Image: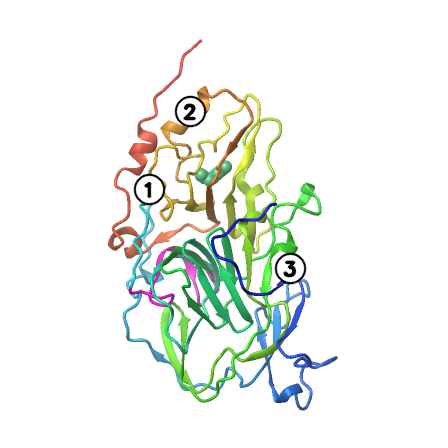
Amino acid sequence: MPVTRFSITDPYEYLNGIDTYHQTEAIPGALPIGCNTPQKCPLGLYAEKLSGTAFTAPRHQNQQSWLYRILPSAAHCAFDLYEGELNNEAKPGEWQHVPDQLRWDPFDLKSEADWITGMKLVAGAGSAPLKTGLGIFIFAIGQDMSERSAFYSADGDLLIVPQHGVLDIQTEHGKMLVRPREIAVIPRGIRHRITLPEGPCRGYACELYQGHFTLPELGPIGSNGLANQRDFQAPVACFDEDTSSTWKIFSRFNASLFVATQSHTPFDIVGWHGTYFPFKYDLGRFNTIGSISYDHPDPSIFTVLTAPSGTLGVAALDFVIFPPRWLVQEDTFRPPWFHRNTMSEFMGLIDGEYDAKQGGGFQPGGASLHNTMSGHGPDRETFEMATTAELVPDKVGQGSMAFMFESCFMMGITEWGLTSCRKVQENYAERSWSVLEPHFTRE
Ligand SMILES: O=C(O)Cc1cc(O)ccc1O
Ligand SMILES: [Fe+2]
């Protein structure tokens, strides 16, 4: 069965499919029929529209949801800048741009941090206010978000890739359990609260300032393959009834954290319908496609989700995975080739060993960045193995899952990412490539 075997069962129900219309009711009859805003909504609910695209976006790109809730999200006090300890040292304005190949040792789990305080911006490009670019975060957290608190990012859609531990995500739209080898997307604006049913959790997140994640085109692959549309899971409506306690709403707004109070839960949506919703996906369901003749294909065949840049065929962000797969190519150097790429490549490892790096330095919970036009490729150990191996069918990546955030932007690195995290490897490039020997002969 092409699904991952998880250590913990997901107790929640889901709606199957993305890039599609969903509707869900926690109480039958919560959604008005045939209209969105009747004079009085069923069950005495408030109707609220949540727009993820401009009202006028083309129909096939338009994303919005109608939410039917006990109180509207507008009902809160003024926001204040949050003064508590957080990731202020990781402001996009301080990004440094360096052409070096970078690799990070596994990031430390921070037992005292929660989802809000434990997200560290490591690299990125562009600007949230201008809705251009993205930020890449590492999270390493040990605490549930405090009770009666919720967070949303106004800066971008969050693509969350847990590497260790489990995230229980309560969103306005409903609940999702997200385990390593699953990913989740929480579109901008959607309030959520994250708890950790299995203890500390570490992973990666990409905050996309522009547009939304969607499925890549399949071209000649045909109508099925890669990540199939129906395997993405959106939560069903699920609400709490609490209009008497004080809640804190945290907002990431231009990379600053603000907090406001309100006297009701934000998780009070009894029914919703539309095209703008969070979702999750089991990477084990990915239908991996590759060469059955010769040569190593471009890794774009491993794209799970893409965020278009606006230029045809160019992604602001491709989320690409390297799942277990058979390699059968004849007379071929099978690992990734040496290359320089106009796209920037940020990689993480969820589990196991990545087949381009046999030298041991790329570890689960660590990361690497090969910026635009920075030369990279297999390390020396991988090169030697691949040029001498007998080319029998070989299953690579068994028990392994690497991924790449591939972006058209030149990536800047934060001060935290370059220095204060203290995880940058000193000798990555030397160890991987300076040790390569010339094999040139004239005959
Ligand atoms: O650099 C990397 O390891 C990622 C990568 C993998 C691959 O199979 C082809 C190109 C590429 O950039
Ligand atoms: Fe690469």
Q: Is residue 152 left or right of residue 41?
A: left
The magenta segment is: 112-132
Q: CA distance from mark 1 to mark 3?
A: 40 Å
Q: Secondary structure at mark 2?
A: helix
Residue at left offset 51%, top offset 71%: 171
Q: Where, by quadrant of the figure, is residue 325 drawn?
A: top right
Res 212 seen here: no
- Work out which quarter of the rendered image holds the N terminus and state it: top right
Disc 2 residue type?
A: Met
Pick whichever of labels 1 and 2 is earlier in the sequence. 1
Q: Amino acid at mark 1?
A: Asp
- The residue wearing badge 1 is 100
In primary-sequence order, the first of circles 1 and 3 is 3
Q: Which residue is denoted by mark 2 in the rendering?
A: 385
Quadrant of the image occupied by residue 11: bottom right
Q: Is residue 324 above or below residue 281?
A: above
| Cα gap from disc 3 to disc 2, whole angstroms | 41 Å
Type of the residue with mark 3: Gly
Q: Secondary structure at mark 3?
A: loop
Q: Is residue 120 magenta?
A: yes
Callouts 1 and 2 close, C-beta under 8 Å: no
Question: Of residues 293 and 396, which is closer to you in this image?
Answer: 396
Q: Nearer the viewer, mark 1 or mark 3?
A: 3
Between residue 231 and residue 428, name the one nearer to us: 231
